[in-house]
Image (cartoon, coloured by chain):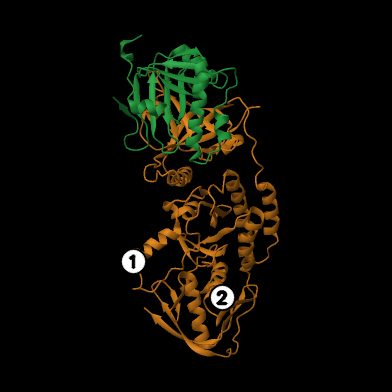
Amino acid sequence: MKLTLDAIRDCLDGSIPGTLATCAADGTPNITYVSQVDYVDSEHAALSFQFFSKTRENVLANPEVRVTVINPLSGASYHLRLRYLRTESEGPLFERMKAKLAGIASHEGMAGVFRLRGSDVYRVLDIQPVPGPVLAVEAPRRNLLAALRQASARLAASGELDALFDQALTTLRDCFGVEHSLLLLLAEAGDRLYTVASQGYARSGVGSEIAVGDGVIGVAAQQRTAICVPHATAEYSYVRAQREAALAQGGGETLPREIPFPGLTEPHSQLAVPIVAGSRLLGVLYAESPEDRRFGYDDEDALSAYGAQLGTAIQLLQQSATEDDGEPEAAPRCPLGAPVQVRHYTADDSIFLGEDYLIKGVAGAIFWKLAKAHAEGGRVEFCNRELRLDASLRLPEVGDNLETRLILLSRRLAERCDYLAIEKTGRGRFRFRAERALRLVEVV
Amino acid sequence: MPSSTAALSLSAEHREFIQGGVSITAGSVNAERLPSMARVIGCAASEDDRQVRLLFCPVRAAGLLTDIAASGRVAVTFSQPSNNRTLQLKGRDARVEAGSAEDEALRERYARAFVADLAKLHFPEALVRVLLQVLAEAPVAVVFHPDAAYSQTPGPGAGARLP
């Protein structure tokens, strides 16, 4: 039976460089090493193009080449006959390879030397195993298809958006053995992702933001493709980047308006997969590990399929959560403790409780509206519909994230104080509970 | 033999490098200019530094040996896995020879050196031995006079022809 590339893609994990044989126009052979031979699909491979070289010249003159790849565990070698098709220097494949190469480069002490100029796409014409016995390979730690089936069943059982967010990550841990993970959703403007749930960290980091296009998570959102980094690399470390940015700013002069990213300080493996529903990007599922090469092609596939299921589940619950009923009613004030100053900065809708930063953006604007209604008219009961109809909140008309923003706000309040809370009271209805008087200050 | 195939004389540094524990791959081409390649399982330079002897498993390298026998062309890349230092030698007078009794000692000496370098990267010896296995009574040899040498260490000087 003819071998296809997916059957041998364990050889393409980047731990052993490939060897590339090309032929010049005058018939002279050339042999070079290639850092990355990447799996594209069962009939296509992509080679990292890093340097202008004899190889480059040869490939353009004579597109048929041969590559040898080695399984890093069994030692099985394969000769691939390939035909060069094109070079991609942007887009999902390029970004995927760029991230992977950054990990390989820093692992090999070649950071700054290995730089991806392009992804050379080849058609696989033939794969021949090199004869001879190979080593037996240990069974994988779990069967990912079985894990995916179990995970799908668990997702389907979630009936509330709030519970689904946490369920998504506990399922990732229980079914796929992923100990450290984050769930981020795309903000209304489509330029940022914000954390709604996390697992495996000392701080939850709920509300922390990542710009679309920034690092593993941001690029996965931008390109709508799984991005995997197999080793620790400064180029893709969020925690290090945040720390350096804070140092560069000098710190202390302005009030902090960023919720720190909760991730591992130096992850040795990172995997981000887009969460999509139909053609709509909803967010990103991010997994990381202190182990090198924790996530392979099979993990990428399993988590991508899981991300698609999660997207459908989130969309279904978002739609059902928007079905409001009933009108809000005023309720008597709660017993009050010592008053607390609440500041609202109109420039970015950031909210401070005393000196503590709470939230900004759409969730900040929602909080301000609730706090004002509460302080001025004693309102306690609210419904989603009135928020959605409030033009000052600037919620988009189609596919808004209101329910998600309320969950985010309620989680931030639960983490930051014990005297304010948002409690769900029914479908599309909630209570704003304040056990201290609020002294509102608007800062223009 | 064309006059342009004037053999290079290997420097002492290159001589030591190609006889050390480096990863070695050889390539050639057939009449249709399709490249072939195979792993080299031992390498020695001649006393006068002008000839290189490469060892192969005749079964695992069958395609390459056929192309070398027909074309005489060979390209060999030597790379140290632990630091990516890389050198390529090319020749146009390569020929295939039966292995000698001395080749067995050369093969084992090379295997030990290669295992030692890969151990620095945590590759187990059993894995390296799979790559270097011989599925025949004895290895076969290819001898050639290098007529060009190139530095291929990744970086700005990659691909530069060496004097």
Tell me, yes or no, if residue B31 can be seen here.
no
Tell me the residue at 37%/42% (across/down): A113
Dot 2 falls on a residue whose secondary structure is: helix
**Mark 2, other Cα within 10 Å: few <14 / some 14–19 / many ≥20:** some
According to the image, label 2 marks what residue? Answer: A414
Horizontal and vertical percent position of residue A347:
38, 73
Quickly name the residue at label 1.
A249
- Seen in the image, is A238 located left or right of residue A74? left
Amino acid carrying mark 2 in the image: Ala
Chain label for disc 1: A
Residue extending furthest left?
Answer: B163
The quadrant of the picture occupied by the N terminus of chain A is top right
Whether residue A84 sits left or right of residue A404 in the image: it is left
Lower position in the chain sequence, tag 2 or tag 1: 1
Amino acid on which the number 1 mark rests in the picture = Gln
Residue B26 lies, with reference to residue A371, above or below; the image says above
Instruction: Judge depth for marks 2 and 1 and give the one in front.
Output: 1
A369 over A332 or under it: above or below: above
Residue situated furthest top in the rendering: B1
User: Vertically, is A440 above or below A197?
Assistant: below
Q: Residue at x 53, y 73 (%)?
A: A412
Task: Tell me the quadrant of the picture where the C terminus of chain A can be found.
Answer: bottom left
- Residue B130: image x %, image y %? 58, 30
Q: Which chain is green?
A: B
Chain letter belonging to callout 2: A
Residue drawn at 50 percent across, 64 percent down: A262
Q: Residues within 10 Å of mark 1 (few under 14, many from 20)?
A: few
Q: Colour of chain A?
A: orange
